[in-house]
Amino acid sequence: MPAEVPPRPAGPPRMADVARLAGVSKMTVSRVLAGRDASAATRQRVQAAIDELGYLPDAGAGALSRGHSEFVVALVPSIMSSNFADTVRGLGDAVTPHGLSLLLGDTHYHLEEEARLVRTLLRHRPRGMMLTGTAHLDSTRHLLRQAGVPVVETWDVPSEPIDQWVGFSNAEAAAAMVRHLHGQGYRRIGFIGGASPLDHRGRQRQSGYQVALTALGLAPRLVEHGASPITMSHGGEAVRLLLQRYPDCDAVLCVSDLSAFGAIMECHRLGVKVPGGLAVAGFGDFEVSRYCEPPITTVAVDPYTLGVKAGELLIRAMQGERDGNPRPAGGELTGYSIISRAST
Amino acid sequence: MPAEVPPRPAGPPRMADVARLAGVSKMTVSRVLAGRDASAATRQRVQAAIDELGYLPDAGAGALSRGHSEFVVALVPSIMSSNFADTVRGLGDAVTPHGLSLLLGDTHYHLEEEARLVRTLLRHRPRGMMLTGTAHLDSTRHLLRQAGVPVVETWDVPSEPIDQWVGFSNAEAAAAMVRHLHGQGYRRIGFIGGASPLDHRGRQRQSGYQVALTALGLAPRLVEHGASPITMSHGGEAVRLLLQRYPDCDAVLCVSDLSAFGAIMECHRLGVKVPGGLAVAGFGDFEVSRYCEPPITTVAVDPYTLGVKAGELLIRAMQGERDGNPRPAGGELTGYSIISRAST
DNA sequence: TTGAAAGCGGTACCAA
DNA sequence: TTGGTACCGCTTTCAA
C-alpha cells in the first residue's frame, strides 16, 4: 500500500476549515460564534459548516488570544469530605453558567501540596481561585498576590486575608455549642478532636471550646486523636480514650459529625447511654446526623451556599476587572446555627 | 500627575522577560525549563532570572504550541457521593504526578448535562476523559469518538464501549448479594431502589436482584422510591413502604449503603429488630456501614482503585499516542466482594 | 550550545 | 457586514 499523503496532520477541525467550507474568512466564523454582527445568510452558512464538521473552538487558543482563560480553581483539603464536596458543587453551580470550568485540586490537608497545586494551576491563568481555609504558606500567599488573580478563602475567617473571603468563625461556632450544652445543664464537657496541627479549622474549634469553657469557669477535658481527615473510627477510638481519662464526663463536643457518629456507635457497644450516660454533639450537620439514632445535636454551616457565594464573589471580581473597577475587598461572614437533637 | 507610559500592559512576567533579564534568547529559557541541553552557567543565570521574576510558564500557550494540553477530565453524576469523590481522588492521584490537572464536571445525574459538559470540556482539548457509568447519549458517544480523545468508562461494564473501561457488573454484584442472603436462610427478600430511570447503576442492581431471585424461584418484593442521588432519608421512607406492602419480608437489599442505613434507623424507630425482624443489606461499603449499629452487610467495590486504574489506562493511552502505538482497546473487570456483617 | 523565524488556533483592530 | 493583518506566549525547526 502506497504511503498516503495526509492533507493535514489530522486532528479536530479548525476554524480555518469551517471558514473554507462556508466560503468566508476566519474572522466571520469567529464573529458568528461570538454572536456578533453578521448577516442572517452568512450566519446560517457558517453554522451549517460548523455542524457538518462538528467543530468545537479551541478554548486554549481563544484564551491566549483574548488574554484570559475560562477556568476557576477549587482547592479543597479533601474531596472525600462531603462538606467540601458540597462547597465544590456550590462553586460549580455558581460559575459554570458563566461559561467557566472547574479545575480541581485536592491538597490532602498539606500546605506544601497546596502551594504546589497553586503553582501548577496558576500556570493555567485561572480567572479566580477558591481556597479552603485561611492557613497557607507564605509562599502561597506571595504567589497568589503576585499573580493578581481573584481569590476567595472559605470555611473560616482570615486574620490576614489574601483577597476576598466568605466563611464563619469555627472558634465562635464551637463556643456557641459549648454554651448550648451548658444551657442544657451539662458541666463536665469534653472535646474530641484530631491530633493533626494541619487541620486548622479543627484547631479553631478546639480553641473555641477551650475559651468558652474557661469563660464558664469549667475545666477542659481534651482528647486529640487521629490524623486528618477525621473519620468515624477516629471518633470511636477517641471516645474510649475520653471515658478512660475522664470517666466523669457528662457531655462531649466532637470536632466533626463523623467522629460524633463514631463516638455514639462506640457508646452503644460500651453500654453507655446517649445522652443519658454521655451527651454527644457534633459539628457540620452531615446527613448521617439527621438520620442516625439518636439524631445528633450539631452545628450547621451550609457548605453548598459557601461555595455558591465564593463563586459569586469571583464572578463579581471578574466583572469588576473587565469594567476596570477596583477589586471589592473584604469578605462575608456567614452564619451557623446550633441544631439541637436527641443526642444531648 | 502626568500619564505614565506603561512599558508593558502589565500582567505576569513572560518568557521574554526572563530571557531579557538573563541575557539569552527565549529558546534558551524554554530549553532550561524543559531540562534540555544548556550549559551549566546558562542554566544557572536563567534559573536566577526565573526566580527573581517569579515566572510561571503559561500552560495554555505551551499547550497550543506543543499540540496538546495538560488536562484530564473527570465526569461524575454527583461529586457529593463519597463513592464518586473517591474515584475522582484516585484519578487525581494517578494523573497529577504526570503533570496533568483535573477538570471536574458534575452531571447531576443528567445525560443531557453530561453531553453539555463533554462539549464544553472537549474545547480544552483534554488528554483523556473519565466517564462514570456506561449510559450516555448518542451525541455524547459521537462527540467523544470524533474527538479521538482517550476515554475510560467506569463503575460499570459497557455493552457498547466508547473506548476503554474499568468496572464491575452491578447486576452480578447485586445478584451475588441475593445469593448470599439466600445462603443465610432468607427467602422473602425485598429490594429498595430509586425511582429514577437515570440512575443506570441502580437499575442494573435492581435487575440483578430480580434475575437472581427468579433463578432461586423466589418472588420479587420491590420498592422504587426517591430521585438520584439516593439519600439516607430515601431509605427510611422506602423501608416503611416496603413493610407496608410486603409485611412478610424477612430481608431487604438496598441499592446503596446510604439507603440501607436510613432503612435500619427507621427500623429502630418502628421497633423492627435488625436483623431479627428484618435483615438489611446495602451496596458500596460506605464508611457509615462499618461503624453503625448493627454494622451493615454490603458489597465492597473499591472506588478509589477504580479511579487509579482509570488514570493509569489514560496515561498508557497517552504514552501510546506519543509512541505511535495503537490504542489498547478493551477494559478491565474489577472485583467486588460481599462483606457479611451483623445486619443480616 | 545557542538563536532566529515560523506557526500553534484563535481574536482585536483597522480598512474596505 | 466583511476581510486582512498582527499578535497572544510558547515550542518546533533549522541554521549558525
Image: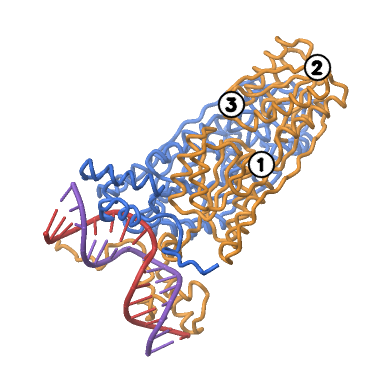
Chain colours: A blue, B orange, C red, D purple
According to the picture, the residue beneath numbered tag 3 turns out to be B197
Residue A212 appears at what percent x and percent y? Answer: 57, 34
Mark 2 crowdedness (10 Å alpha carbons): few <14, some 14-19, many ≥20: some
Q: Nearer the viewer, residue B245 or D4?
A: D4
Helix, strand or loop at mark 3 = loop
Q: Confirm whether residue A133 shows in the render.
A: no
Task: State the residue at coordinates (55%, 37%).
Answer: B136
Task: State the residue at coordinates (47%, 46%).
Answer: A102
Q: Nearer the viewer, residue A127 or B251?
A: B251
- Marks 2 and 1 in Cβ contact (< 8 Å): no
Residue A197 appears at what percent x and percent y? Answer: 62, 50
Residue B76 appears at what percent x and percent y? Answer: 56, 40
In which quadrant of the rendered view does residue B98 lie? bottom right
Query: Label 3 to label 1, Cα distance in Å?
Result: 35 Å
Helix, strand or loop at mark 2 = loop
Side (left or right) of B325 relative to A2: right
User: What is the number of the mark on residue B188?
Assistant: 2
Q: Amino acid at mark 2?
A: Arg
Tags 2 and 1 both on a single chain: no
Question: Which chain hosts label 1?
Answer: A
Question: Which chain hosts label 3?
Answer: B
User: What is the number of the mark on residue A230?
Assistant: 1
Q: How many marks?
A: 3
